[in-house]
Amino acid sequence: MSNLRGAYIDLAAIRENIKVLQDLAKNSEVMAVVKADAYGHGLIPVAKAARQGGATWLGTALLEEAIHLRKSGDKGRILTWLGSPKDNWQECIDLDIDVSVSSIEIASAIIGAAKKSGKSANVHIKVDTGLGRNGVMPNDLADLTKVLEEAKAAGQINVVAVWTHFALADAPSSPTIAKQLEVLDQSFKFVESRGFKNLMKHAANSAATLTAPNAHFDLVRPGIAVYGITPGGEVGKASEYGLRPAMSLKANAALVKEVPAGHGISYGAEYVTKTDTKIALIPLGYADGVPRIAGNKGPVIAKGKKFSVAGRVCMDQFVIDIGDLDFATGDEVVLFGDPAKNEPDVEEWAKASQSIGYEIVTRLGPRVPRIYLNEI
Ligand SMILES: *Cc1c(COP(=O)(O)O)cnc(C)c1O
């Protein structure tokens, strides 16, 4: 029997989740956000499944993620939005990757690259409508569009869209959402007034795709929902929207043994057995992305029963106290997966780690093999 240890990625779930999101945003195109190695699920297989599910766009943060995607053979529309001046803008332009601009410095880098490329760059103007992160401040939009107008006249750029990102989309009741949409609308109209035509408008991440139809516009940009995980906050469970988690993290016990009552478990003996009991050693640790802070907390299913990590999570391994469970060395445990299959929800690991589902899946390390199911 082969080793079970790994993250199992159900590509059928990715395809179906894209369809669910498309149904929610019927009149919009869907961009599957595949940054950070597709949220730890694996960039290339996930991108392929997302395309099969109907995503007409793929989105990445870093330029090199987009370049890697294109070089892997992806033929569809790709947008990348987080570059600094010395990044390889020219390769993006050569490879027909749309780029985002938030400043004159980046506009200059893009324009310089377009001159060298001999092609015009497809540019999305990102506006800081209130997130306070990337994006041009509305007050600086006039100066930025002036630079873009000249570059357009010279055939170096083509402005495709005006776009933004929400600060509090996971709190649908927050008044900041309407406020940000108002600033986006004003910015959009301003850019149009400068002679840019046929512009797209986009704003919605997963939370807004699920809860804010008035923010869907031409394109929605879900990330975490594609993987069947809730953005958290007030959004509720992913299953309430018909989304299903794609990833299950599993391992075989490396050792099962009996220990007496009063036995300290793992470094620091932060767990001490209360009775004579059995412990199982699980070969996944913080080097694999199991959060160390989840010691004595993280949930684990063995033979359908739920246990918690006993004591500290170590670099390569942790222990569970399984009492008198009928369980042997080599038997299977599940850290998280699909709650509909009685696997812990990744949200439980997020809570046990004072974190969010996003971090739990993206931090899984390269020592965890990704095993793909239902690839077509
Ligand atoms: C990461 C990201 C998304 C996707 O966010 P989710 O909350 O995962 O849906 C969308 N747009 C931008 C700009 C992002 O950085």
Image (cartoon, grey):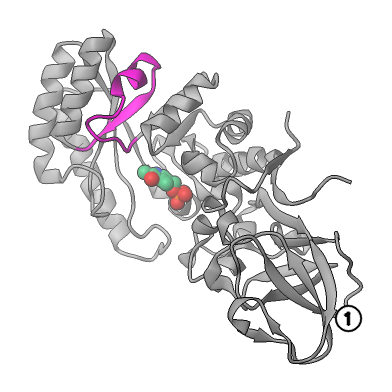
Q: Residues within 10 Å of mark 1 (few under 14, many from 20)?
A: few
> Secondary structure under badge 1?
loop
**In terms of image quadrants, where is residue 344?**
bottom right
Q: Is residue 132 above or below residue 235?
A: above
The one nearer the camera, 277 or 364, is 277
Q: Is mark 1 within 8 Å of ligand 1?
A: no
**In terms of image quadrants, where is residue 301?**
bottom right
**In terms of image quadrants, where is residue 167?**
bottom left
Name the residue at the right extreme: 326
Q: Quadrant of the C terminus?
A: top right
Residue 347: within the magenta? no
Q: Is residue 3 above or below residue 197?
A: below
Left-right relation of 85 to 310:
left
The one nearer the camera, 371 or 217, is 371
At horizontal 56% and vertical 53% (from top left) the residue drawn is 361
At horizontal 55% and vertical 35% (from top left) the residue drawn is 43
Amino acid beneath label 1: Asp
Q: Position of residue 65 (x, y in %)?
A: 44, 32
Residue 6 visible (yes or no)? yes
Provide the residue span drawn in magenta. Answer: 81-102
**Mark 1 sits on what residue?**
324
The one nearer the camera, 329 or 93, is 329
Q: Position of residue 16 (x, y in %)?
A: 66, 41
Q: Position of residue 319 (x, y in %)?
A: 71, 72
Q: Is residue 169 above or below residue 344?
A: above
Left-right relation of 62 to 24:
left
Left-right relation of 249 to 267:
right
